[in-house]
Image: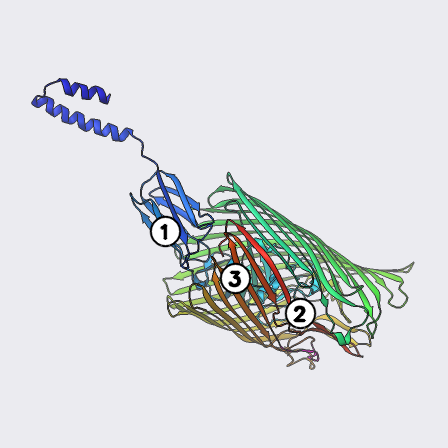
Amino acid sequence: MTVEILRFIAIRPLTRSSSRALGVGLWLLTSYCFASSPPQPTTLVGEVHDPSGAPIAQAQVSVQAGNFTASTTTGPEGEFHFPALAVAAGTVHVSAPGFSPAEQTWSPGVARLSFVLQVAAVNERIVVSATRSSMKLSEVPGSAVQLSSADVAATAALSLDDLLRQVPGFSLFRRISSRVANPTTQGVSLRGLGGTGPSRALVLEDGIPWVDPFGGWVYWDRIPRTEIASVEVFRGGSSNLYGSDALGGVVEIATRVPTESSFSADFSYGTEKTPSLSLWGGTVRSGWDLGAGLDLSRSDGYILVPTSERGLVDTAANSQHVALDTSIGYHAAENRRVFLRSSLFEESRHNGTRVQTNSTATGFWVGGVNAGWADRDSLSARLYGQAQGYDQTFSSVALDRNSERLNDIQHVPSQQIGGSLVWNHGWRAQTFIVGLDNQQIIGASDEQLISSTTGNHFANNIAGGRQLATGVFAEDIFRHGNHWTVIAGMRWDDWNNNQGSTLRLSRPAGPIVATRFPDRSQSSFNPRVSLLRGFSRNFSASLSAYRAFRAPTLNELYRSFQQGSVLTASNPFLRAERLTGAEAGVRGLFVDNKVEARATMFWSDIVDPVVNVTINTTPTLTNRQRQNLGRTRSLGTELDGSLHLSDSIELSAGYQYAHATVINSTLALIGLDVPEVPRHQFSWQARYSNPSRLMASIQGHYSSLQFDDDLNTLPLKAYYVMDLLLARKLVSGLEVYVAAENLLNQRYLVALSPTSARTIANLGPPILARAGLRWDFPGRQK
């Protein structure tokens, strides 16, 4: 058509009228040509680096122009590529975990962009555990700590609990690594609340309870290390959102969700014949995401008892485990995902003598939905279940420790099923959160009792029951301008213990004695009110008051256990622990945000704390029973700070003072320290990190004297240990490293087992040095 018009113009003379017609025709021709020619696709490329020049892999890059959007992620060298954009100009936004986001405008003629992301200040990190919703760390009116993937990568610790010891106030029931500790001693304590084995802080994996359903302790190796994205620790009573177990706070572990095809591997070998392998991989296809993780480790361990006190029965405390995790998810829309995850975990241990062993086998599954709409509402639903078998053997050890006799074989099966529903709604300057959760636990302790003198199996003892717990909660986060944040929440819980019983069958043909315990029901109302005042962008103060509780576990109610020469009896009539607490804190950024500091003063009173109370002592055995003590009080201060000397060098430190004492009980205990609580804890870390070359990290941890018993007659002296990690990049995504825990090889007391004849000591681990390789494809941002 265009050719015909031009031919017509060339052969016809122009008149005034024809000139006008020609002008109109040319205008129509131009309009037609431009309207009918499709826009040419545009190519945009670029790269993303940190301030040192190292590439940032897996950064999120998005282009927006009007209603048009497109997104991608950077490759292992920090590069991104949009091969065929339908627009020629717009805004490019780049973000990556641990960095402040950046934005640039893009106009015609610009085909390549370069971004340098600055390291994000700690207070800009997003946490979830404090409010069950996403919130900047600087906006949380409480004491929260987040360990990013960089923090996890920069520690020499092989196990997760050893990594968390850099958070002041975090401790297990006994101050020993989970690598060699009996699992029943691996419950978490925060802020000097002490413990008897079960956790007095709730541990979550992606929002799902992670504590043992029967006993309340924690298996710290259940998640492959390479699968961990971050760990949050929120200190202070949190039953207003989470119910039982969140007496002293919450520890939440976030795992990786695939956003592209990626793979991570970590292999090391160390002293005590300790090989370790951790793998994780994931991919995304047509809206589906698939992920899988594997963790394998074993250690020959070490002999717990000092050389001068050992006998022929003393052998190394050791462990081995395997953890397998798989997940599948489907993204129905950008902010809507349905997923299913399952995991298997097995471990076995020798507990320091030839006869004393334990093993665990656990199967776990969880299905869930995350849905958001209208940029103001989100819904989270979870359904989960677990089946577990726990086996342990106990023995009676002779005074000279040269012989022992098997006296108890325990099998503890348990099952758990639960679910939760949480709705978040934003309205103007407020965020409303409402939810409910429910769980049921069934468990029993099946014992074969064996005479320590004759070796005869003389009785069977079966004890157990059911627990049903339901909770509903609501919270309002209200922001007034840029200076005030008020958070008010409350929760009501009801729990029932039913079908509790013991059955004793004497052998070979003795009587059967059955005892049925009455069904019991309790409820608890737990509010929390927090106020944060921001005086400037870099300085704020907060106040909080709260109540919290912890219901006794089936283990405390129905299962007895023995640790060395100490036998602890169950108590089916235990009541719930109830905490009342308050705290005040300040947070500040100084020297162009290079110095970050936080200070918090706290007070916590626990009514009816469950404590292992000494009943009597014989030449070969100390008898204790779990009892509600009366009232304990913990007063203290937390100090946390960091100094960013440069983009590559960072110093951090934390300190906790906790004065935890008994203030109401029998006369013999009033004024004494709460067992297993040190007055002073201090940790520090110095880190140099240049991802293109070298990473070096050294840290130290100090813990002051604490007592191993309720009568304060068994002091465990103060100790100080240091860890070191050195890592060197070989090629993109691949690095070699050496690590050492307890670098100075300090030997310190972790437990004392008394008899009327003597007290047997247990020691903490010696140096664990190892070397390994880490590979991330594409290079994971740290």
User: Circle 1 is placed at which residue position?
Assistant: 114
Total marks in image: 3
Circle 1 SS class: strand
Q: Position of residue 38 (x, y in %)?
A: 31, 31
User: Circle 3 is placed at which residue position?
Assistant: 151
Disc 3 marks a residue whose amino acid type is: Asp
Residue 450: say if magenta: no
Disc 1 marks a residue whose amino acid type is: Ser
Disc 2 marks a residue whose amino acid type is: Pro
Foreground pick, 181 / 571? 181
User: Circle 2 is placed at which residue position?
Assistant: 766
Circle 3 SS class: helix
Residue furthest right as drawn? 509
Q: Position of residue 408 (x, y in %)?
A: 81, 63
Q: Position of residue 749 (x, y in %)?
A: 68, 74
Residue depicted at x 61% and y 63%: 161
Which numbered disc flags the more N-terminal residue, 1 or 2?
Answer: 1
Q: Is residue 34 visible?
A: yes
